[in-house]
Image (cartoon, helix red, strand yellow):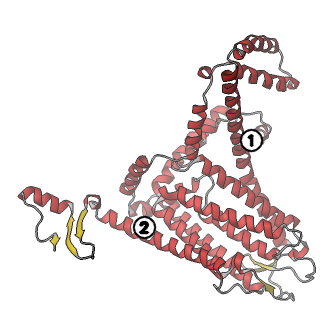
Amino acid sequence: MASAVEASSCEAIQGNPDFYGLGIRIGVYLQWVTAWINLLVDPLSAQSVYDVNSVFVFAILLATMVASFADDPTIEPIETHILLQFALGFFVTTLSTFGMRLHFLRPDSVAELGGQLKELMGVLGSTLKTPFSLSIVVKLLCGRITLPLNAFSTLKPYHLSWSGVFWRTATACMLAIINIWFWFASYPSYRLPGRNCDPPFIFMFSRQQLSGPIVVFCKAISIIIAVVVVPPFWILLHLTIRLFHYMIMVLNRDLLHYIMPQVPQRLRNPVQRIDSSLSGFNPSNLRQIGAHVNFLDFLSKPSSETFRISDLLKLIVYLGRGKEEKEREADAHADARHRSPQAWATSLTGRICILWNIFIVLSITWFILDIELTLKWNNIQGVSGIDSAGQLIPFVIGGISTAQVLKKVVLLGLAQKYDDWAETTVDISMDLSGNQERFRIRTRTTLESEDQDGLGPTKYDTWH
């Protein structure tokens, strides 16, 4: 990498505190930390954590586009880089598109993921019937090989919805596109027109100027990110379009059957004759004709022979929801019973989890250093105080989120220590003035004692 160079002679940049002021930065950093702790102690809360963070990332990217793509940009390219680091930091640290990274948080989940990967490789091997090679990749890209996509669904944690996967994948694709624009189509020397000075500085293990090998390296990373996130988004987009296409077909079919009940029967015989005439041909120029024939054939069949609008609505509910709450709670208790400190320290899966969590901590540290040192090295001023509502709101949200996660950690620890907490009840009575008349706590121990002695509440659990 290029060595650090002398400081740029550019004048100080007057920063935009509503984009990356101190309050906003602290709020984002707290979101990274609290999301990681939340997923670590309660993986079943991933759906809500991902929803909140993905909306936060989308808002950051939308603000970046508005400020950077305007005819008269309101922020410097280096400020765009800072905003992109916010968004990229979420995806690298805690925000997963498909949810596979949740498996690396606990040893039992790592073992489960290993079994699912073996099963997936077996399915792919039986489908491809040949060793995986470059030719197989080319055939996949050209659409000459069909893969059972349901085989990949087992890799997604059951409590995450497919609609959330699509939303997060689309947000990641949006980030990849903006990132490529920044590195390939931004202003020369990454300065706004009229600022003829040296390129700005970023953090890359040390102080590095945006020129030469550093820019080439960052461009390569941006391409790699796009290669990773764009294909899954493209597949999910096609599946979503196909779902809406089927919805329109079913609505047209039902409407046609309702308005003109005799038309479907009249269509059936001509469609069968056309289909039999085309069965002996398979040229590519007949694909469009075949698509129209299939559509007419669908219109000619009653809903009992294909699928109903209710079937599609059920599918939408399935794609938009995770597992039912009762099943989630049962699995949460099972996970708590199987979680032990010895498994983390001795097993191979435990070591993988430890390394993964170390990676998350180092990633959070990396992005914080990157953002803070970039602000310092490029002399960006006016963003070191919390003096506006735009900064106060995310700061307060981050602080409250931290307090809620700490509360969850304490409660989960106490719940594991006192496993009879669910059988504890409290009986309180008071008047409208707030004067307490009775305060009684009844636990499993007191209930068993009362049942054995045949007594009512004793003086030890009742105060007047």
Which residue appears at 71% of the width and 28% of the height?
Answer: 252
Residue 348 in view of the camera: no
Q: Quadrant of the C terminus?
A: bottom left
The residue that mark 2 highlights is 408
* Viewer-proximal residue among 435 and 59: 435
Marks 2 and 1, Cα distance to the nearest angstrom? 48 Å
Q: Position of residue 344 (x, y in %)?
A: 44, 62
Quadrant of the image occupied by residue 188 = bottom right
Residue 197 against residue 230 in the figure, above or below: below
Judge by depth and name the residue closer to the eye, 84 or 258: 258
Q: Position of residue 192 (x, y in %)?
A: 88, 77
User: With 47 as the anchor, is 424 left or right in this view?
Assistant: left
Instruction: For residue 326, say whether it is visible.
Output: yes
- Mark 2 or 1: the one toward you: 2
Which x, y percent locates residue 146? 71, 33
Tell me whether the residue at label 2 lies in contact with that at label 1, contact meaning CB atoms closer than 8 angstroms. no
* Residue 12 as seen in the image, left or right of residue 246: right
Local packing at callout 1 (Cα closer than 10 Å; few below 14, some 14-19, many 20+) is few
Q: Is residue 444 above or below residue 68?
A: above
**If the image is split into quadrants, where does the N terminus sit?**
bottom right
Could you tell me the amino acid type at mark 1?
Ser
**Mark linked to residue 133:** 1
What is the crowding at mark 2: few (fewer than 14 residues within 10 Å), some, or many (at least 20)? some
| Circle 1: element type | loop
Amino acid type at image mark 2: Lys
Residue 458: give x, y in percent of width and height. 10, 67
Number of callouts in the render?
2
Return the residue nearer the eye: 147 or 33. 33
Whichever of callouts 2 and 1 sits on the residue coming sooner in the sequence is 1
Point out which mark residue 302 bears. Answer: none
* Residue at 72 percent of width and 16 percent of height: 263
Residue at x 38%, y 49% (from the top left corner) = 330
